[in-house]
Amino acid sequence: MRAPQGRVPWALTIPAVAGLAFLVLPLAGLLIRTPWSSIGPRLAGTQVGDALRLSLISATLATGLCLVLGVPLAWMLARLSFPGRRLVRALVTVPLVLPPVVGGVALLLVLGRKGLVGQWLDSAFGITLPFTTSGVVLAEAFVAMPFLVISVEGALRAADQRYEEAAATLGASRLTVFRRVTLPQVAPGVMAGAILCWARALGEFGATITFAGNFPGRTQTMPLAVYLALENDPDAAIVLSVVLLVVSIAVLALLRDRWVS
Amino acid sequence: MSLDAHLVVRRPSFDLDLSLTAESGEVVALLGPNGAGKTTALRALAGLAPTSGGHLVLAGRDLGGVPAEHRRIGVVFQDYLLFPHLSALENVAFGPRSAGVRRRQARAQALERLTQMGLAEHAAKKPAALSGGQAQRVALARALAVDPRLLLLDEPLSALDAHTRLEVRSTLRRHLADFEGVTVLVTHDPLDAMVLADRLIVLESGRVVQEGPPAYIARHPRTEYVARLVGLNLYRGTATGHTVALADGPKLDTAESLDGEVFLAFPPSAVALYRTRPDGTPRNLWQTTIASLERHGDNIRVHLDAPLPAAADITAAAVADLSLSEGSRVWASVKATETHAYPA
C-alpha cells in the first residue's frame, strides 16, 4: 500500500509539462513536415547521398582516431601517477566546453597551411589538412575525443584493479595486462564511449565548417548540408534532419542500458 | 634456506616487521587477527606492496626491487580473482602464455593441470559457472602453472561455505603436499592453519608473537589471542615446583614442576562448578561469580568473574541442576592433571 500523498503542487507540474513540450514538440513538428512520399528519391539524390556518405565515413574514421589515441590517454590518466595529472585531465575536457568554432579556429592556426605544424607538414611532406576530408576527420575527432576519454577513464577507475595485480603475479607485462585483462574488463565502457564519440562526430558543425569548409562531396557533412539546404531547398533540409534524428535515437537505444534507465 | 625474507612495511596504523624463513616443501601459515598485517606481508612477498626495508631471497635469487611480473611467485587470492572473461582453461594458460609459451602448447599444459585437479570437464566454463570449490582449484592450478618456487595463499578457504570448506581443505592439503616449493598461507582460521601448515607464525599488530609447529602452539599459547583461538584459558604466574602463583589470582597446582615465570593453560572443559563447597576438596578450588552464560556447541560456556576470569564448559543439564544464572556465586575447581604450565 502506498503512503497517502499530499496535493500535487501545480507550481512544479506546469513548468515540468511545458519543459517536456518544449523538448518534444520541435521534433514532432519535424516529423509532421517531413515529405515522406519523396524521402526515398531525395536520400538517393547526389547531394544528400554524398553528404550522408561523407558524414558516416568521417565520423567513423574520427571515432577510430579517438580510440587509437584516447584509450591510451584514458589509461594514462587512470593508471599512472605523474605530476600535473589533474591539469592534464582538465585540459582533456576543454574541447567539451569550448565552442566548436573556437576549436576550428585553433586547429586552423596550428594545422593550417600557415600554421605552426601545418607549414612544416606542407613543406616536408606536401600534406595539406584544412579544407580536405582529412580535415573533417580531424575537426570531428578534436571535438569528440573528450567524450571517449572521460567514458573510458571512468570505466578504468571503476574496474577492479586486483585483476591486474593477479595478472602481474602470473608474469604478464604491463602491456599484456592492459591487452588481456584491463581492456576486456572495460570493454562496455569503451563501447559506450565510442558510440557517444561517434554521435558527437556525426553532429559536428562549428569546428568542421571553420577548419574544413563546406565543399560538397569533400567536406560537406550532413549538418553542413542541412544548414545550406535550409535556404534553397527546405524539404531536403528536413529529410537530412530526420536522418540525423533517427541516428541519434538509434544511439540512445544502443546506450539505453548504460545511461538511460 | 629456500626462502629467506625480512619484510618491513610502514603503514599508517602499524609497522609490519616480519622475518620469515622456510625450506622447500614446507607449508608456513601466517595466523593472526584482522588487521595484523598478514595480507600486507603476502602482498609484500608477491611484489604488490612496497617494502621500506628488509630483504627477500628466494632459491638463491635476490628479489628485492624486482617487480611482481618477474618474481615468479604463485598467488591464490582470497576471492581467487579468476579473469571473468576467460574460460577456466584460458585462466590456467595465462601464466605460460605471458611467459611466451605458444598458445597451443600453453593450452595443452593447462588442460593437463586441470585434469590433475579433476577439473577436465570444466575447462571450457567461465569462472561464473564454477562452484566455489572448483574456482578455488582453478585458481590454484593457475598459480602453479608458472612453476613458482613460492606459492602464496590468501585466506584460501574463506570464500567457501562450511560444507565445501571441509572437502576443499583436505584436497588443498594433498595438493600442497605435492608442491615442491615453499608455501606461505595467510589465515585467521586456526583450524585451516593447523590442518594445512607444518609451521605457524602468529602475527599481532605487525609483530611475530609466536612461532612453531601447530600441535605445540595449540598446547602452549603465549598470547590471549592464540589462547582464544585454540580454546584455552591462559594466565601468567610464578611457579615454585608444582604450584603456580597467578599474577592476581589464586595459586594453582599443575602437572609440571617448574620454577620462575610461566604460562599456565587449561581447557574450559577441565573446569567443574559447584553451588556449595565440595567435599574431599580438590586442590585447585576458588569461589567466584558468574559473569555470563552462552551457548557453545552442545554445551553452555560459563564466563567466570574475578578472582580468576575463566571460561568453563558445562552441560545444559548441569546449568539447570545448579540453577546457574548471571551473578550466581559458585565454587570452581580445575584438576591439576589438566592444568599445563610452561616457561614464559
Image (cartoon, rainbow, N blue to C red):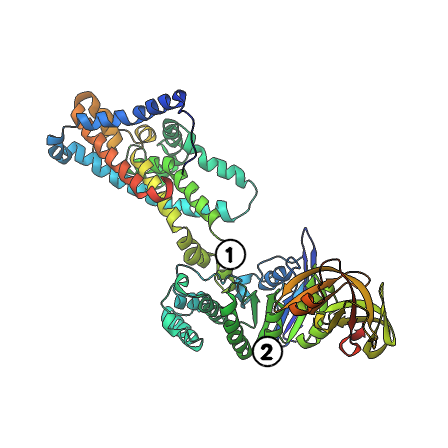
Return the mark for residue B25: 2
| Residue at (82, 62) in percent of width and height | B307
In this rendering, the answer to whether B51 lies above or below A41 is: below
What count of labels does the image hold?
A: 2
Q: Which label is found at residue B51?
A: none
Residue type at numbered disc 2: Gly
Q: Nearer the viewer, residue B44 or A251?
A: A251
Disc 1 residue crowd, few under 14, some 14–19, many 20+, Cα 10 Å: few
Relative horizontal placement of residue B53, taking residue A30 as reference (left or right)? right
Quarter in which the C terminus of chain A is drawn: top left
Where residue A116 sits, quadrant-wise, is top left
Chain containing the residue with disc 1: A
Q: Which mark is residue A162?
A: 1
The answer to whether residue B243 is above or below residue B127 is: below
Residue B223 drawn at (x, y percent): 74, 65
Position above or below: B170 against B77: below
The picture places residue A122, in percent across and down from the top left corner, at 34, 37
Residue at figure coordinates x 27%, y 40% from the top left? A250
The quadrant in which residue A13 appears is: top left
Query: Which of A32 and A161 lies nearest the eye of the viewer?
Result: A32
- In terms of secondary structure, where does tag 2 sit? loop
Label 1 element class: helix
Viewer-proximal residue among B61 and B251: B251
Residue A128 visible somewhere in the drawing: no
Please identify the residue farthest to the right as the structure is shown: B240
Residue B138 position in % (x across, y down) = 45, 69
**Is residue B74 shown left or right of residue A250?**
right
| Mark 1: amino acid | Arg
Q: Are marks 1 and 2 in contact (CB under 8 Å)?
A: no
Q: Chain of mark 2?
A: B
Instruction: Indicate the position of residue B296 as horizontal and vertical percent values.
Output: 63, 66
